[in-house]
Amino acid sequence: MSEILKIDNVYKYFGKFAANDGVSFGLKEGGIYLLVGPNGCGKSTLVNCISGIFVPEEGHVYYREADITSEDMYKIARRGLVRTFQIASPFLRLTTLENMLVALPENAGENIALSMFKPTWVDSEINAVRRASELLKVLGLKHVWNKPANTLSGGELKLLEIGRALMSGAETILLDEPVGSIDPVLCHQIFAHVLRLRDELGITFLVIEHRLEVAAQYADHVFAMDRGRLVTEGTAEEVFADERVIKAYLGE
């Protein structure tokens, strides 16, 4: 199986400090990948380089074999590579369904030139609502479809972030701390939905998560970083038994 996302010898500097120091790895389509490492090891910087927030000084990022290293974030998202953030940021006064619909990359009904001609956009509006409703069902959010986002729980907001990414056309999602500050029971529920999205929709996930006792149970493959470099990769059991990873977390 070919790699859907490839990071090739990426360097990102802040002054003379190499936050990413020649990082290389690849993701195959339809997997759940976990990116781990102690605070300050370069995980978030790397995800920022992948998603277009940062441009690396050296190296390349490829998505479906296209070089996206210097592309704008919105162009990368339109390719199907979308990221979420640690802190969910929906439109708080909009309902769950409305937040999903806002994430559409294109909406003919919002086009000034077309808005007066209902036949040109009504079908797309109906299809968009149908698509959003289907995703809310998959994510376990259908019961809150008409509730304002500011009434949702922390776990529901995290799932809404994933839903909005899917509405935008995401085929690969970079999840930054998807279960941070979430109740332990809800943590497993969120990852259960991630599993379902992988199995039913073929979505590829790259997950940054510090709650390793939860995330490791769901990862198909784990990458471990320390001091800007990739130190090892493999199954969760292999990676967390690696002395380099143990030393990295112990600060030795």
Image: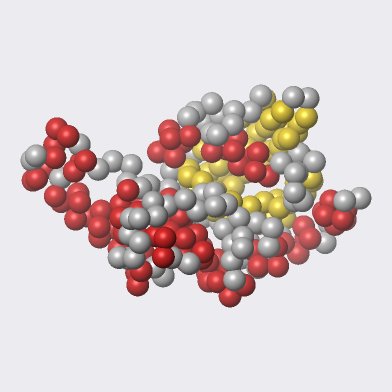
Residue 104 versus residue 141 in the image, above or below: above
Q: Give the percent coordinates (x, y) of residue 156.
A: 46, 65
Residue shown at the point (63%, 52%) measured from the top left: 208
Which quarter of the figure has residue 212? Answer: bottom right
Res. 198 in view: no
Q: Give the percent coordinates (x, y) of residue 143.
A: 35, 72
Residue shown at the point (82%, 55%) measured from the top left: 249
Residue 214 versus residue 172 in the image, above or below: below
Q: Is 51 on the left or on the right of 151, as rendered?
A: right
Q: Nearer the viewer, residue 16 or 243?
A: 16
Q: Give the percent coordinates (x, y) of residue 71.
A: 49, 28
Residue shown at the point (51%, 46%) measured from the top left: 83
Res. 194 in view: yes
Q: Nearer the viewer, residue 234 or 121?
A: 121
Residue 250 versus residue 16 in the image, above or below: below
Residue shown at the point (8%, 45%) measured from the top left: 119
Q: Is 109 on the left or on the right of 53, as rendered?
A: left
